[in-house]
Amino acid sequence: MKKYNFDKTIDRRVTYSFRWNVKDSELPLNIADMDFEVLPEIKEAIKKRSELDCYGYIDTPKEYFEAYVRWWKERHNLSLDRNWFLFSSSVVGSIDTVLKHLLKENDQVVMFTPIYNVFYNCIKNNGLVLKECELIYRDNEYKIDWDKFEKTILDKKTKAFIFCNPHNPVGRGFSLEEINRIINLCKKNNVYLISDEIHCDIDYNKSKYVSIFHSEYSTYKNIILLISPTKIFNIAGLQTSSLVIKDELLRQTVQNALYKEDIGEPNYFAVDPVVAAFTHGKQYVVELNEYLCENLEFLHKFFNKFLPNLKIIPIHYTYLLWIDISYYKLKSVEFASRLKNKTGLIVAPGKNYGENGDNFIRLNIATQRKNIEDACNRLFDFIKELEGEK
């Protein structure tokens, strides 16, 4: 018998939810947070914390980092040293801070695109130059363009590579062979390798994610690993994450930068829920991934039967479905706009993630099954109308 009920409806419209601040008739499946009830031990940890009599400044205790160490060892077979950790209020804030303080204006930053849209802002806002290395899309899957990546990463103007692993939005992880090759190319040009691995716990078909720190070459001094429980436990609103940096000098430099940007100290509720999640959340994560797999299976069956001209890109990680809409000759912004206006279903246009995402939409499947069924029916109605126009 299941311990957790992911079919339970949570009325997020009354919680100031950014995503659910829409019309009653609309179904927003665009933004990457979940609609499931959080782990009970997380709620209990917040409750206990709230019952204390003073909400002043707090430090980051050793228990916080030790919880990370246990989780990554038990779940991912990765040995991390507590002394390598730094606290940050968010992964995006960490990337922004690292770029601001380690790079100079007009330095180049490389990314595999399409990629999470906020990363573009981190580069632009710091006066840096984006060098895209477009992932090759062929036969319904994505691969690295190694010739272009090598040329781009070895360019003397290139100073950093933002690596999204598992990748948002295309939903794939990277193999140990690929990661070894990436590290060694970055090392040749002394490039900072910033690895965002926030989606690593959302896995399908027992996929085993490979971290940048699983590599035998992870001793490279310019690696910065970014991790957080906020995606898998749906606690992004608590503003909590960690950086893991092996090199002592780099770690101290980044620590100073985090303090300067005022994101290096936890808020009053940022610590205890993380310890609770990593201590009590193993079964929750198992059942959550099973539920997401069932959502994904439902979508595949529905699309195969009723929406054969929409192609779901196979995903191994994340709860974000990447869907090829190219058959209908509409770019993603127009497709998403017309879909919303016609049916009330809100998806993310693929162009948000780069020009090479413009034939795609992104759909969040971390919601109750009834919402997945509703979304499928709305999509069917919209596609039926589109095909009637031909």
Image: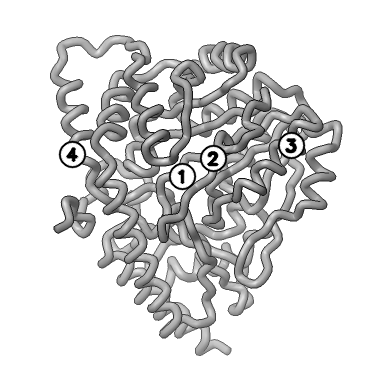
Give the foreground label among 3 and 4: 3
| Residue 312 at x, y percent in the picture | 51, 70
| Residue 170 at x, y percent in the picture | 56, 57
Seen from the viewer's position, the closer of residues 339 and 284 is 284
Measure the C-alpha gap from mark 1 to mark 3: 22 Å
- Disc on the earlier residue, 1 or 4: 4
Question: What residue lies at 54% left-to-right and 50% top-to-bottom?
Answer: 168
Q: Mark 1 belongs to which amino acid? A: Cys
- Disc on the earlier residue, 2 or 3: 3
Measure the C-alpha gap from mark 2 to mark 1: 8 Å
Question: What residue lies at 56% left-to-right and 45% top-to-bottom?
Answer: 165
The tally of labels here is 4
* Circle 2 residue: 211
Circle 2 crowding by C-alpha within 10 Å: few under 14, some 14–19, many from 20: many
How has the structure been colored for display?
one colour
Circle 3 crowding by C-alpha within 10 Å: few under 14, some 14–19, many from 20: some
Measure the C-alpha gap from mark 4 to mark 2: 29 Å
Q: From the image, which quarter does the N terminus lie in? A: bottom left
* Circle 1 residue: 200
Q: From the image, which quarter does the C terminus lie in? A: bottom right
| Disc number placed over residue 184 in the picture, else none | 3
- Disc on the earlier residue, 4 or 2: 4
Give the foreground label among 2 and 1: 2
User: Can the viewer see residue 308?
Assistant: yes
Q: Please identify the quarter of the rendering in which residue 186 is found.
A: top right
- Left or right of residue 54: residue 215: right
Measure the C-alpha gap from mark 2 to mark 3: 15 Å
Q: Are marks 4 and 2 in contact (CB under 8 Å)?
A: no
